[in-house]
Image: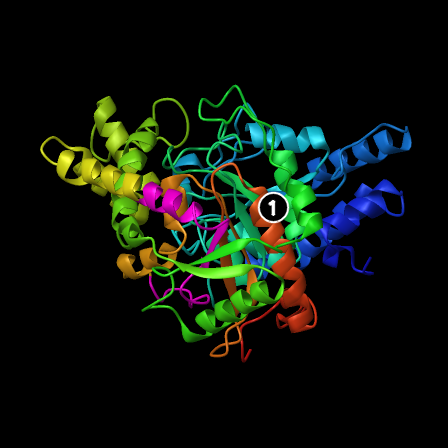
């Protein structure tokens, strides 16, 4: 256990709490102090609930002192992505249209966190309605990458990845629609898992694209992420897409960390032109380590992955245009009256509100989706994209007949500088090229740090993909590779992040 409690893993904190070596109030206060010290620079949180977190921590300490049987993570604080409803706490989804909205209920994931005794530190920043790959599309300003404050922390879950990388929380929740857990993990040297679609309840998640969205755990180690996955997962009758089955044995797999005899497929289509040389080099080294650990590595072709990006950016906007229709200024959220109209109609109020409340990326995707669903274009665009989606799922099924897991770089590059791609949406969208296929097929995926790219000294990630409902394979492979990489790099890769004034700062500052 490090002297600085914010540097401890969630597993180590859980063990110390269980033996009463430390208290939850001590751990929670340490993280609140860290937030006060550094979040002004990182801007990872949109709302911090100091009073509520300490009250939850005190309650856990009292229950533990009374001899109650508690969950493994009881007393370990957590940060929650602002797309999940939290009773009594603001939920904005990074949008002005929900500014100040306080939900009357908790998302199922949040209910599970509270029942397991994890004090909620606050709500993390995100791209507006989870639309983006950089967290630059938050209406409240971008989060920054603790490795270099002039760079993006990934998106849409950049707030959750940056709280972990800046040691402002030991655990965080995320959501992954096209890579928004895995891509931020890759560029911050943290760990993130997108469970099998339906493996974690979506009830209470403000929907972007209902057939793609998936909540999942974020941590700094594979074991920490597994422990959180076990809390978050499970069947929920409030979610019609929830899998009615036990949570896969993810914690046991993470502790076993064994890849001997496993067949690992390297996806031919995910790693060619457009991938940064340093990212590719770290990936190749990780694959070699898997061979040394006893896995058999083969190349696998998934030819329809080449069309995943195009299909995704028809399906997602189409579903978003439908899901975001509920923000109409009539029931909750922002209401703006049109200028110069004495007695505006409902349609005029709605138009003025959506114009003022939605940012440019949200408007862009609503327009694209509405067009793709419009009469005369549905079959040509949305219908064709769904056919491609079926072919991608078929590619996965064929691949898993030959191998146990698939691997690729998580993202084609390391973190780019803030503002570099804001004026080029297509360049921004390409950041998710390796992560999108898993969402289209509903299979689980994980990103773990693979090392630092030679060109810029910034983190890269390796993605592991498994068949649907076989999430435990991610943790077996991830934990084994993580241990080998710890030996290779002489410790956690995150320990190499530059520090200046208590928080990682821009290079050359």
Residue 106 vs 131, above or below: the answer is above
Q: Residue furthest left?
A: 376
Q: Residue furthest top?
A: 237
Q: Residue 9, percent across and down?
A: 72, 53
Secondary structure, mark 1, is strand
Q: Residue at x 50, y 74 (%)?
A: 453
Residue 146 seen: no
Please say whether residue 406 is one of the residues in the magenta stretch. Answer: yes
Q: Residue 284, percent across and down?
A: 49, 70
Name the quadrant of the C terminus. bottom right
The magenta stretch is 392-421
Count of marks placed on residues: 1
Q: Residue at x 49, y 46 (%)?
A: 466
- Left/right of residue 366 with respect to residue 445 in the rendered view: left
**According to the image, label 1 marks what residue?**
172
Q: Residue at x 53, y 56 (%)?
A: 185
Camera-side residue: 204 or 423? 204
Please say whether residue 322 is one of the residues in the magenta stretch. Answer: no
* Quarter occupied by residue 75: top right
Q: Residue 262, percent across and down?
A: 56, 53
Residue 439 vs 152, above or below: the answer is above
Camera-side residue: 164 or 14? 14
């Amino acid at each position: 256990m490090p002297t600085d409690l914010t540097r401890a893993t969630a597993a180590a904190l859980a063990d110390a709490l269980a033996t009463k070596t430390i208290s939850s109030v001590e751990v929670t206060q340490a993280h609140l102090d860290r937030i006060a010290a550094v979040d002004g620079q990182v801007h990872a949180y949109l709302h911090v609930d100091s009073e509520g977190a300490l009250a939850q921590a005190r309650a856990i300490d009292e229950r533990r002192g009374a001899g109650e049987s508690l969950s493994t993570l009881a007393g370990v604080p957590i940060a929650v992505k602002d797309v999940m409803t939290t009773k009594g706490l603001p939920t904005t989804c990074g949008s002005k249209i929900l500014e100040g909205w306080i939900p009357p209920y908790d998302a199922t994931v949040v209910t599970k966190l509270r029942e397991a005794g994890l004090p909620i530190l606050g709500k993390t920043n995100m791209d507006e309605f989870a639309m983006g790959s950089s967290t630059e599309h938050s209406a409240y300003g971008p989060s920054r990458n603790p490795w270099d404050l002039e760079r993006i922390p990934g998106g849409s879950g950049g707030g959750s990845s940056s709280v972990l990388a800046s040691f402002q929380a030991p655990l965080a929740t995320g959501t992954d629609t096209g890579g928004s857990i895995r891509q931020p993990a890759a560029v911050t040297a943290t760990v993130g898992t997108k469970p099998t679609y339906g493996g974690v309840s979506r009830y209470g998640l403000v929907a972007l694209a209902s057939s793609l969205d998936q909540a999942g755990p974020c941590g700094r180690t594979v074991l920490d992420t597994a422990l959180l996955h076990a809390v978050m997962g499970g069947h929920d009758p409030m979610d019609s897409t929830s899998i009615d089955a036990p949570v896969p044995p993810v914690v046991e797999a993470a502790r076993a960390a064994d890849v001997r005899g496993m067949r690992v497929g390297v996806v031919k289509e995910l790693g060619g032109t457009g991938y940064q040389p340093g990212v590719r080099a770290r990936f190749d080294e990780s694959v070699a380590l898997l061979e040394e650990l006893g896995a058999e590595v083969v190349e696998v072709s998934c030819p329809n992955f080449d069309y995943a990006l195009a299909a995704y950016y028809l399906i997602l906007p189409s579903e978003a245009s439908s899901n975001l229709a509920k923000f109409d200024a009539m029931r909750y959220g922002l209401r703006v009256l049109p200028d110069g109209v004495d007695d505006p109609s409902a349609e005029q109020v709605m138009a003025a509100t959506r114009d003022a409340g939605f940012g440019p990326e949200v408007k862009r995707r609503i327009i694209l989706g509405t067009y793709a669903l419009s009469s005369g274009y549905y079959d040509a665009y949305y219908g064709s994209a769904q056919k491609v989606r079926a072919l991608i799922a078929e590619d996965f099924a064929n691949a898993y007949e030959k191998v146990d897991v698939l691997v690729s770089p998580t993202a084609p590059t390391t973190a780019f500088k803030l503002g570099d791609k804001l004026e080029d949406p297509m360049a921004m969208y390409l950041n998710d090229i390796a992560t999108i296929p898993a969402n289209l097929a509903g299979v689980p995926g994980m990103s773990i740090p693979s090392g630092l790219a030679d060109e810029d000294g910034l983190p890269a990630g390796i993605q592991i993909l498994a068949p649907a409902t076989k999430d435990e394979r991610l943790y077996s492979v991830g934990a084994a590779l993580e241990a080998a990489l710890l030996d290779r790099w002489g410790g956690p890769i995150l320990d190499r992040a530059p520090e200046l004034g208590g928080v990682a700062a821009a290079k050359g500052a």
